Amino acid sequence: MAETKKKMKIVVSLDLGPEVMPLLYNRDDLEIIAWPHASSSGKEWLVKNIAGADGCIIMLFEKIDDEVLDAAGPNLKVVSTMSVGYDHVDLKALAKRGVRLGNTPDVLTESVADSSVMLALMAGRNTKEGTNLVEKGQWPGWSWSPYGLCGPQISPNSPADIRTVGFIGFGRIAQATLARMIGFGYTRCLYVARSKDPARAADIEQTIKARHPTLTTVKRVELDELARESDVVYILAPGGSETYHIVDEKFLKQMKKTAVLVNNARGTLVDSDALAKALKEGWLWGAGLDVVEGEPNITADHPLVKEPRCVMIPHIGSATWESRIGMATMSVNNLFAGLERQPMVSEVQL
Ligand code: DGY
């Protein structure tokens, strides 16, 4: 009599939708335990359900640490996060158990670059105040007065108007955002990167200049210079302890009064209290945030929600059908590769 092979147990902490869940359900060698909602399952559900699992798919609100991994036990081969960022995963805890980690870059590069530029435009042009008035039925008679609701222009107004875009983090999404800013007429690009290797910087700068011949400057700088010189600062670096509050009071105090700050990375990179103070006191012009420390528990009395020149959207920088279906599919393919001990589409080196 043929022996029936034990199914591999897979825990999925989010509903990946009708396009992607069948990839899992169609495999008869897998037992799927899935949280049935699109929102995060939360850690408690995960800990309760993960015992004996061979693999799991998670999202960025679930912390993967010793507690979850101990609850999973020794069968666990792969954790697959439906996100490019992985600051919610304890890499050391995975490494010591030999568990592999997959993530989902590339398929969200264009959507996050789009939303980064959108946030810069929104923060520069008083859209929060303007739309608030319109929604309250208070279309202001004074808005088309000579200087009603004016803000600094994001695009240079003439070739003599030289603008600088600054990036904290200069990976794929930052470079895609730069391409858009060049379309707006920016000719100077400064960036802060983790690597201090001059040869690496020279290589990046040469590649970027060859790709964008209208750029006069591409330069890796220290944070202070980036703060002082940039007209728009984009934060597009990974979260975690290395970048915690990289934008603090000192940084904000050095920014141009007309500059705009965009955070499309992780909330932990910005000191929220310092930013609220900076906006109130006019150290910079405005901020556009897709992420904020403490999300999703952000209430109407949060100091940044109350700031008229702080535009906030609820972590939807990658929320296009194209990106999200791509991310969900990649997370499943990474899981399969992990189970089969094959190379993943994208694997985080532990
Ligand atoms: C990620 O995937 O890490 C991002 O936060 C997407 O918006």
Image (spheres, grey):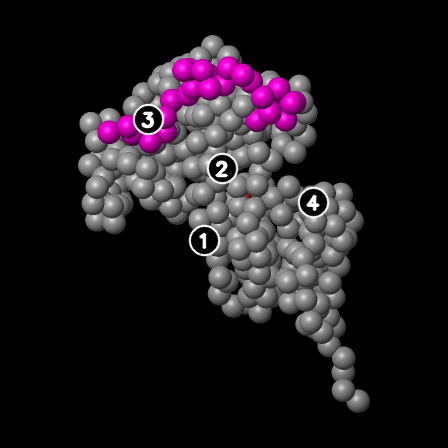
In the structure shown, which secondary structural element does the residue marked by tag 2 occupy?
loop
Pointers 4 and 1 in contact (C-beta within 8 Å)? no
Q: What is the magenta range?
A: 131-158
Q: Position of residue 105 (x, y in %)?
A: 48, 52
Mark 3: C-beta under 8 Å from nearest atom of ligand 1:
no
Which residue is labeled 1 in the image? 106
Q: Which mark is residue 19?
A: none
Secondary structure state at the residue bearing disc 1: loop
Q: Mark 4 and mark 1: span between their CA atoms?
A: 23 Å
Q: Position of residue 34 (x, y in %)?
A: 74, 56
- Residue at 57% in and 53% down: 321
Q: Locate residue 169: give its quadrant.
A: top left
Q: Is mark 4 within 8 Å of ligand 1?
A: no
**Residue behind label 2 places its C-beta within 8 angstroms of ligand 1:** yes
**Between discs 3 and 2, the one toward the N terminus:** 3
Dot placed on the residue nearer the N-terminal end, 2 or 1: 1
- For disc 2, the marked residue is 265
In this picture, residue 276 sits left or right of residue 294: left
- Say few, some or many: other residues with alpha carbon within 10 Å of mark 2 (under 14 / 14 to 19 / 20 or more): many
* Distance from Cα at disc 2 to Cα at disc 1: 15 Å
Residue where numbered disc 3 is placed = 230
In the image, what residue type sits under mark 3?
Ser
Element assignment for label 3: loop
34 to the left or right of 272: right
- Which is more N-terminal, label 2 or label 4? 4
Q: Amino acid at mark 4?
A: Ser
Give whichever of 283, 91 is nearer the camera.
283
